[in-house]
Image (cartoon, rainbow, N blue to C red):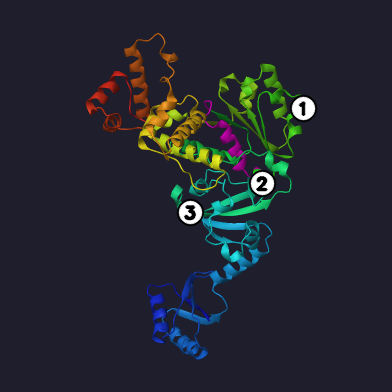
């Protein structure tokens, strides 16, 4: 039996209500507060007899503030549960929810059929078991990962996956995610999936975190987007993520064209359906005339197609093309500017390398020790993340040859060869002392921009407070915002 009690909201009234049930030795198994007006108490009391209810009803009505007592069929939360369960049973697409550890909490019958297990066996299973190549840990850790139209394969069948994060109320931190709800939609045409880029997490560590959040906000918009950065800094990855972070991914297609492909005489819009994302790689490599022709084509794109360009040298874009992409510009930081997070980047890159090698089967077998991380942190990475991944592939091979599972400093140092320091073209014509003063000044200006005190600067650089103060005066650096 379920009981609904309408009452005033006053301190102690709930205690008095439950005390009456205890006096009649009736066990209350669950309850709920609220109702449409916030003046309801719902209690589940299985096994309560009709005569007991009549006696308890009289006692409850004598409690100050209690206005009405009646029996009901279901508590509101139970009704919502049964209604949702009924709705999901009639949904033909697989729908499931997972917790922060990637375990399936609930799923509909279509999901159980897609996974090839009975409905009662789905809760508690690891999502990674069915989607081995999906980066489940990154997906559940943060919002800045692909959300719409991700191509996945389940038991030889192609699907588009979309997910909605479940966040804790009044919490916006990364750790506030409680899980996610995932929906799978089967794709009939294999070629539709083959044209999509592989969805990857964006590794939102250190300064890259701000770029990821900026990308997430920009992905919802429709204006042309320009992504700039050094070679290997992740421009193409971010361009693909624009598609997966945009609702366009659920109904439109994706096309990526490099500078050579853009010289084709066919109009750009002939290569896309009515909606989608068009990524242009390094358009500054085109001649001025070709860039002008490209601009004419971009201005005639259908409204449902969004243009995204990547560029290592945006200053080489023709004025008209530069203006076309000037509305939204996202600059990616180089890897060497994020040295405190090199260990996290290297760990994520190593997991990705192993996941591709094993096809997602089993947990990663290799890790990095502190010595290897320290060595990686000191390198300058002119090729950024591309160079880091290639570096780790060789280091992993050397580690396996040794029969070990931990990549050491010796494994990474052996790959380095005759590596040099930072490119020093800017120091040409300067003496050693002048060059070092330039480095000092740049480093202190960087710290001053963070509005650190001189004591915090001294602690960061391992110098005395007096030395920092003297250098700030020497270079005329102000710490005022």
Rendered position, 40 above or below 379 = below
Q: Position of residue 105 (x, y in %)?
A: 53, 60
Magenta highlight range: 229-248
Q: Write the residue at 48% across / 33% down.
A: 397
- Residue 182: give x, y in percent of width and height: 59, 54
Q: Secondary structure at mark 3?
A: loop
Q: Which residue is mark 2?
A: 250
Chain-order first, disc 3 or disc 1:
3
Which residue in the rendered view is the most extreme toward the bottom?
51
Q: Is residue 468 left or right of residue 60?
A: left
Question: In the rendered image of this protein, does residue 20 appear above or below residue 87?
Answer: below
Between the residue at mark 2 and the residue at mark 3, the CA separation in whole angstroms equals 26 Å
Q: Residues within 10 Å of mark 3 (few under 14, many from 20)?
A: some
**Residue depicted at 63% across the width and 38% down the height:** 197
Residue for badge 3: 101
Q: Nearer the viewer, residue 59 or 90?
A: 90
Q: Which residue is mark 1?
A: 266
Which quarter of the figure has residue 242?
top right
Q: Main secondary structure of the magenta part?
A: helix
245 versus 325 height, above or below: below
């Amino acid at each position: 039996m379920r009981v609904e009690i309408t009452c005033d909201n006053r301190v102690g009234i709930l205690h008095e209500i439950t005390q009456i049930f205890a006096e009649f030795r009736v066990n209350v198994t669950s309850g709920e507060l609220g109702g449409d007006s916030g003046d309801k108490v719902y209690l589940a009391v299985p096994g309560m007899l009709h005569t007991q209810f009549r006696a308890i009803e009289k006692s409850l009505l004598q409690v100050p503030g209690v206005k009405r007592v009646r029996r009901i069929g279901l508590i509101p939360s139970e009704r919502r549960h049964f209604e949702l369960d009924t709705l999901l049973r009639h949904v033909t697409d697989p729908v499931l929810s997972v917790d922060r550890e990637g375990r399936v909490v609930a799923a509909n019958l279509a999901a159980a059929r897609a996974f090839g297990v009975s409905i009662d066996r789905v809760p508690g299973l690891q999502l990674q078991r069915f989607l081995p190549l999906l980066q489940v840990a990154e997906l559940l850790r943060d919002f800045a990962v692909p959300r719409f139209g991700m191509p996945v394969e389940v038991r030889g069948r192609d699907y588009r996956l979309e997910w909605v994060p479940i966040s804790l109320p009044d919490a916006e931190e990364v750790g506030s995610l409680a899980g996610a709800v995932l929906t799978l939609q089967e794709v009939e045409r294999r070629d539709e999936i083959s044209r999509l880029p592989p969805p990857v997490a964006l590794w939102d560590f250190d300064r890259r975190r701000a770029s990821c959040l900026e990308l997430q906000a920009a992905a919802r918009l429709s204006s042309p987007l320009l992504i700039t950065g050094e070679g290997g800094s992740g421009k193409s990855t971010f361009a693909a993520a624009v598609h997966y972070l945009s609702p366009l991914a659920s109904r439109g297609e994706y096309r990526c064209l490099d500078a050579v492909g853009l010289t084709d005489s066919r109009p750009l819009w002939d290569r896309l359906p009515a909606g989608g994302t068009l990524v242009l790689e390094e358009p500054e490599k085109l001649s001025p005339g070709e860039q002008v022709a490209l601009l004419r084509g971009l201005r005639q794109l259908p409204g449902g197609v969004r243009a995204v360009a990547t560029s290592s040298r945006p200053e080489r874009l023709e004025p008209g093309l530069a203006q076309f992409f000037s509305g939204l510009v996202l600059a990616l930081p180089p890897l060497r500017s994020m040295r405190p997070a090199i260990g996290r980047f290297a760990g994520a890159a190593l997991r990705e390398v192993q996941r591709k090698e094993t096809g997602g089967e089993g947990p990663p077998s290799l890790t990095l020790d502190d010595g290897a991380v320290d060595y990686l942190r000191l390198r300058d990475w002119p090729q950024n993340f591309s160079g880091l991944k290639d570096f780790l592939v060789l280091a992993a091979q050397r580690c396996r040859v040794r029969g070990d599972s931990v990549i050491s400093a010796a494994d990474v140092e052996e790959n380095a060869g005759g590596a040099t320091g930072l490119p020093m073209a800017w120091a040409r014509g300067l003496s050693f002392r002048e060059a070092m003063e330039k480095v000092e000044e740049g480093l202190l200006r960087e710290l001053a921009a963070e509005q650190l005190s001189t004591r915090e600067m001294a602690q960061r650089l391992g110098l005395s407070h007096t030395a920092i103060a003297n250098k700030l005066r020497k270079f005329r650096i102000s710490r005022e915002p």
